[in-house]
Image (cartoon, rainbow, N blue to C red):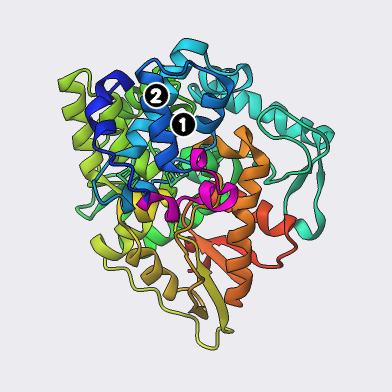
Amino acid sequence: MKKLSELRSEIDKCVRCGTCRSSCPTFKVIGRETSSARGRVTLIADYLNGGIGLSETYLKHLKECTLCGACRTNCPNGVDTVAIFAAARRDATEKQGVPFAASVIFKNLLASGGILSLGLKLATRLQGLFFKDASAGLGLLSRFSLPLVGAGRLVPPLASTPFLDLPEVKAIEGKTDKKGGTRVAFYAGCGINYLMPEVGTKSLEAIKRAGAEVFVPQGQACCGMPAYAMGDIATARSMALKNLEVFEAVDADFIVTSCATCGHGLKHLMSDLLADRPELKARAEKVAAKTRDISELLINELGFKAKGKAGSEKRIVTYHDPCHLGRAQGLREEPRELLKMGQGVVLKEMKNPCLCCGLGGGLMYNNYKLSMEIARKKAENIKNSGAEVVATACPGCMVQLRDGLHRFGVDVRVAHIVELL
Ligand code: SF4
Ligand code: SF4
């Protein structure tokens, strides 16, 4: 992974044309130059040239980017803005350290499944002290401001049993006999493991229905994307190494995840994080080549055809493109094709379905108010689509969409695509 000082030529590719401004979710809300990609690239260039230091203002504009990648996609000069912004965060973190709460979570919890499982068992018991039930079983509302959570947010309850600890998941750790069919190793990621195990079990069901043999290797770690977004590259790298060792040791045709962010992490981030050691990078690229999003696996590799139940009630469903699936992995058609196979699903597109939900880049804890202002636009688009369900393919987006829809009074259910099959 390149350091900021190695990206000078990338920064110089920016001709300050401003094309990126129209697609930037933070610029759409704030409307100031420094909240656009062009403004951020200019600030970083000034910083590198010694014109400004690691000031509060500089750091604020760095942290207020969702790393959604819309600017990179729309840049006529092909500037890798996301690489520049991520390297600038890394530079700042190396000089200033990781914020305390994030450091505890990344270094001690997400990096070690065992400790996290133990910590979460305790947290599951204590969550009533910090959260209260929201109406209609939507989730939990934080009672007061908590590190990385804040006050008054709708969050999903912690799973009483993490996905990786479910008996039916433990039963398929990888000990199945090879029967000659397609073998799929499932990667859960933290969102599914700790918050939405039901998305994991529905995913396993769909893979089995598609005729493949699925197993869930134990020892898998966080994909490293949250630590990467905070600029904590050392922690993200250690997670990448752990996952590399786990997944290159399994006998699988495909490694599959139902989390857009984890998929991007395994396909692209892992090899980038290990690029300082060519032999590790080559091994990571082999793992990446086998990695698929669940929609990509079911549609492109297994030719999945779900049979709708006769007489299923029709329901209008709209689809939110996660940035890490649509832009980062180029997967827009596959999730929609899968969605159309859902029971009674009638797909109705919302305006700008690939607009970021506001969660990315750690914005929901760096600047929750801005994160929710971006979510407000998303909530309006969802409401105007007339859908009763918004489907997506990323547990992180699901958390943000539920919070945003609840906050802005939009009564639309949020579901993962696999839950509608
Ligand atoms: S990042 Fe690209 S689109 Fe944005 S100002 Fe620079 S050259 Fe133009
Ligand atoms: S990554 Fe997204 S939020 Fe950040 S500058 Fe680019 S378009 Fe704006």
In the picture, residue 315 is in which quadrant?
bottom right
Q: Residue at x 71, y 26 (%)?
A: 122
Closest to the observer, 78 or 344: 78
Amino acid beneath label 1 = Ala
Q: Is the magenta stretch mostly helix, strand or loop?
A: helix
Give the image quadrant in which the ligand numbered 2 is located.
top left
Helix, strand or loop at disc 1?
helix
Residue at the disc numbered 1: 229
- Measured as percent of width and height from the top left, residue 147 is found at 70, 27
- Measured as percent of width and height from the top left, residue 293 is found at 35, 52
Q: Residue 46 carries which label?
A: 2
In the picture, residue 406 is in which quadrant?
bottom right
Report the magenta residues as a range.
19-35
Seen in the picture, residue 136 relative to 13 is either above or below; the reply is below
- Measured as percent of width and height from the top left, residue 103 is found at 56, 18
- Measured as percent of width and height from the top left, residue 10 is found at 25, 32
